[in-house]
Amino acid sequence: MSPKLKKLDKEFENIFIVQNDLKSPISEAFRTLRTNIRFSSLDKPLKTLLITSPIPEAGKSFVSVNLALTIAQNENKVILVDADLRRPVIHKIFEGNNKPGLTNILVEDKKIEEVIRRVSGIDPNLYYIPSGPIPPNPSELLGSNKMQEVIEELQKQADLILFDSPPVIAVTDTLVLANQVNGVVLVLDVGEVSRDVAKQAKILLEKVKAKILGVILNKVDMGSEGYYYYYYYDDERKKRRSQ
Ligand SMILES: Nc1ncnc2c1ncn2[C@@H]1O[C@H](COP(=O)(O)OP(=O)(O)OP(=O)(O)O)[C@@H](O)[C@H]1O
Ligand SMILES: [Mg+2]
């Protein structure tokens, strides 16, 4: 870990997992995830991807940061946007301030150039936009025309735009964003989430016509390795194979 990335918050002590150990099983899992995402949409290049989960604390932010880093390591320019306007943490992970950020663009017409950041000591292909001040009306802002314009504009500036977001169940923030992006990845905390709750999230996302690319099973205990592992289930490819 570079000196710049020393932990701020105990919770995120080991967050830069793919940066710190390229050979670990988890880094390998993120590279597999990167490949699966790249091939999940063959007809149209996938430019915007939303990371969400049915319920809180599944590891959305953890996955967003490590996936963004893994994609950046592959020489693709990535912009990670903190669209969790209720519990934003991306700025904490990168040891920055959350202001100015996304909500400043949406409310005050600030330019992307004024809020986008890079983190020294981290891959130069990785950029991020923090949340900005927490607004009273996150859903309204995320579902606004202005947000659509921002998404359009961001796509011109990078190979992939990743959005971290709040959980699907309970608030509508993620649902209003889900149909504005090319694909959605659901993070499931295997120890916490029930089949019914996972299904409910899937139904909600399908209702708004979101394209669910797959799910990540997070926090799977790998036994003696003592590590968490990811498995990416690619719905689209499975469907194609069975056709
Ligand atoms: N695979 C993993 N390996 C190790 N730690 C993990 C893993 N996934 C998540 N964590 C840890 O679990 C905690 C919750 O993760 P995180 O904040 O990413 O979840 P979240 O879904 O974004 O939560 P919220 O709903 O509050 O936004 C963090 O401390 C994070 O570092
Ligand atoms: Mg989070």
Image: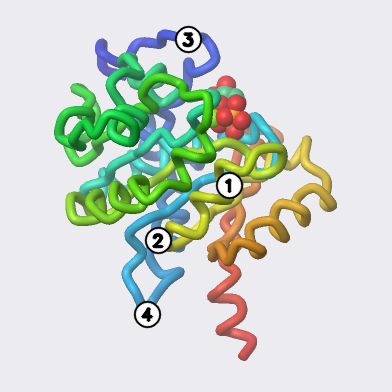
Q: Residue at x 77, y 41 (%)?
A: 193
Q: Specify the label residue 43 is tagged with.
A: 4
Mark toward the viewer: 3 or 2: 3
- Name the amino acid type tagged 4: Asp
- Cβ of disc 1 within 8 Å of ligand 1? yes
Q: Earlier in the sequence, mark 2 or mark 4?
A: 2
Q: Quadrant of the C terminus?
A: bottom right
Q: Residue at x 52, y 24 (%)?
A: 136
35 in relation to 154, above or below? below
Q: Which residue is mark 2?
A: 35
Q: Residue at x 47, y 60 (%)?
A: 183
Q: Which residue is mark 3?
A: 9
Residue 116 horizontal/vertical position (percent): 22, 32
Q: Earlier in the sequence, mark 4 or mark 1?
A: 4
Q: Quadrant of the N terminus?
A: top left
Towards the viewer: 222 or 84: 84
Ligand 1 shown in quarter: top right
Which element carries disc 2, helix, strand or loop?
A: helix
How far apart marks 3 and 1 lie (CA) works out to: 24 Å
- Cβ of disc 2 within 8 Å of ligand 1? no
